[in-house]
Amino acid sequence: MSYVVGVDAGGTGTRALAVDLDGFRLGRGASGGANPNSHPFEVAAARIAEAITEAIRDLDPAGCQACVVGMAGSSKLTDPEVAAVFHDTWAKIGLGCTPRVITDQEAAFASMTSEPAGTILVAGTGSIASRIENWKAAKVVGGTGWLLGDEGSAYWMGREAVRAVLKLLETHVPDGPLAQAVLAEALGTFTEDRETLRARLITAANAEQPIRLARFAPLVSAAFEVDDPVAVDIVYRTVDVLVEMIEATRSAEERTPVVLIGSVAGPDSPVGVLLRQRLEGLPIHFSTEGATGAVWLAAVDVLGPSAPRPSELVRG
């Protein structure tokens, strides 16, 4: 049987999907995180291989006509030595094709639409927006990481929350919902004067990896729901930043799809709700899994753009 495989390889998990050329699901596989920026190359490659192997466990590997891997951190494979580790590992599976690596954004975009052009916005722990043309990323905005940017991300929102509380502590002990939640999350119980609280908060924030500031973002969302003015300000500034990122990838009158991914842009997040309002009139989708996009792009490699969209129905 001829079939194709798609893989969504992220930082915390990897999912693989095998479908036949009619789009019917033949198998699924899963493994651990496989982002080569956060895992050793050998480990990342092996986890992708594990997910593929599980997805095709009842199939002849040689029957795979195309395999597309949507990978977070795919730029690492521009290093020939790193690429060799991945390709040597995957070659042991015995697929009838050489896997093609794309970005996780390209896979996420294709998971929600067959349109060849549009915008994909990732707003989770980090943030990045890409212009998609012919199913490939043609322009990237953001994606520079916590040290250089990540504006509009959970990390950025959390940092803004801590900074706002520190500013308030310069003059008084704040009693607003967000400030109290930030202090409780960072310090546990607290009864000190404002100077001591400020010093403790600075120490606590700097004692952990910077990306851990993202844990304060849900506190912003919760405080927004009760109209805390500090949280309202952060949420609206986050929306402004994300809209600017999206607009930087599009022409003013463009009506191509916008695909969103990540907790900050989720349909139940206050940022996500306001973001959709600001983008009213555009086709907006929220993606939760890139494997369906990757496997459809694998089918496009074989059949062209008329390839059927993947079905959750199991063949036979």
Image: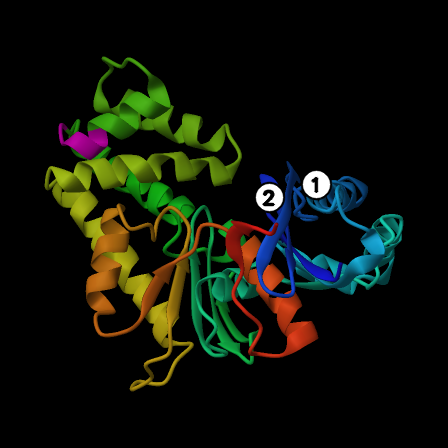
Dot 2 corresponds to which residue? 11
Q: Main secondary structure of the magenta part?
A: helix
What residue span does the magenta drawing correspond to? 175-179
N-terminal of the two: label 1 or label 2?
A: 2
Q: Quadrant of residue 122?
A: bottom left
Q: Is residue 223 above or below residue 144?
A: above
Residue placed furthest toward the front: 316
253 relative to 146, above or below: below
Q: Amino acid at mark 1?
A: His
Q: Is residue 286 above or below residue 45?
A: below
Q: How many marks?
A: 2
Residue at 22%, 54% (x, y): give it: 273
Q: Are marks 1 and 2 in contact (CB under 8 Å)?
A: yes
Across and down, in percent, residue 6 comes to 64, 57
Q: What label sits on residue 39 in the rendered view?
A: 1
How many angstroms separate mark 1 from mark 2 (CA)?
8 Å
Please name the residue shown 33% across and 84% down the image: 254
